[in-house]
Image (spheres, rainbow, N blue to C red):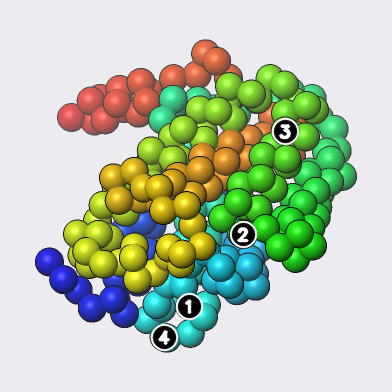
Amino acid sequence: MHIPLQYVYFIGSIVASLPWLVVFFFRKDLQREMLVMGLLFMVPAVIAEYFIWTVDYWRPITLEGTRIGFEDILLGFTNGGLIAICYEFFLGKKHLLLEKKNTNVSALFIFLLLVFVLTLLFWGFHVNSSIATPISFLVAVTALLLLRRDLIVYSLVSGTITMIGSIPVYIILEYLSPEFVNKTWLIGNLTGITIAGIPIEDLIYYFTLGCLLGTFYLFWKNEGLNPHSAVWHETFKNIVDRQ
């Protein structure tokens, strides 16, 4: 199949957003986190897309033909929401408040630390954004985990789920347009190493992003996950009982 490159990014953003709708429908207990984290990630992601990522990493062709399009906004929102809850969704866990206290300052510190490191590396030391971005994610999540070591496993699992979950989207995009990766990513600025046709930089990006976003909301709200919750068991039982 060969769809004009102009439409591939748009179609891909729609396809990548479908899981968001599924999760939002099945896990009402996660809806607030999905909406909050979606909005929190969307804004800085769109800004970074315009000023950083499209400079030396990739330049997707939007439906409008602009540097930033509807696709970036949609992906920023749905990616932020999905990645934040991937651990809870796949393992069927519910949130558990650890202690009621104000952690807004700590959460803001983590965010500002990320921005500082990314800005310093990209504009200060002229490090390619494909390298600077995951490094900034790693620095931020390391600081977060030093404050909440109980989230280490959640972080690593979230990163792994996010990375693996991104692969089908690339496969679909390459099926729609076999030249999508070569004509969208600035290959000359990357290592050239690919796995299943996917630039390794993207897989690293999604892993580190998953490690951070998968734990940020829990850190911010000072929550953990109830080890005894079994949401999927309850869901399937309710479905069976309705039959």
Residue occupying the point 25% across, 59% down: 174
Residue 64's mark? 4
- Which mark sits nearer the N-terminus, 2 or 4? 4
Q: Nearer the viewer, residue 105 or 31?
A: 105
Image quadrant containing the C terminus: top left
Q: Earlier in the sequence, mark 3 or mark 1?
A: 1
Among the two numbered marks 1 and 4 on one chain, the one whose residue lies closer to the N terminus = 4
Kind of element beneath mark 4: loop
How many angstroms separate mark 2 from mark 4 (CA)?
A: 27 Å
Identify residue for label 2. 128
Tell me which amino acid carries mark 3: Thr
| Residue at x 37%, y 26% (from the top left corner) | 232
Q: CA distance from mark 1 to mark 4?
A: 6 Å
Image vertical order of residue 38 relative to residue 164, above or below? below
Asked if the residue under mark 4 is in contact with the one under mark 1, i.e. CB atoms within 8 Å, the reply is yes
Q: Which residue is mark 1?
A: 69
Q: Amino acid at mark 4?
A: Glu
Mark 4 or mark 3: whose residue is earlier in sequence: 4
Asked whether disc 2 touches disc 4, contact meaning CB atoms under 8 Å apart, the reply is no
User: Which of the marked residues, 1 or 2, is nearer the chain's N terminus?
Assistant: 1
User: Dot 3 corresponds to which residue?
Assistant: 142
Picture coordinates of residue 161, whole percent (x, y): 43, 35
Q: CA distance from mark 3 to mark 2?
A: 21 Å
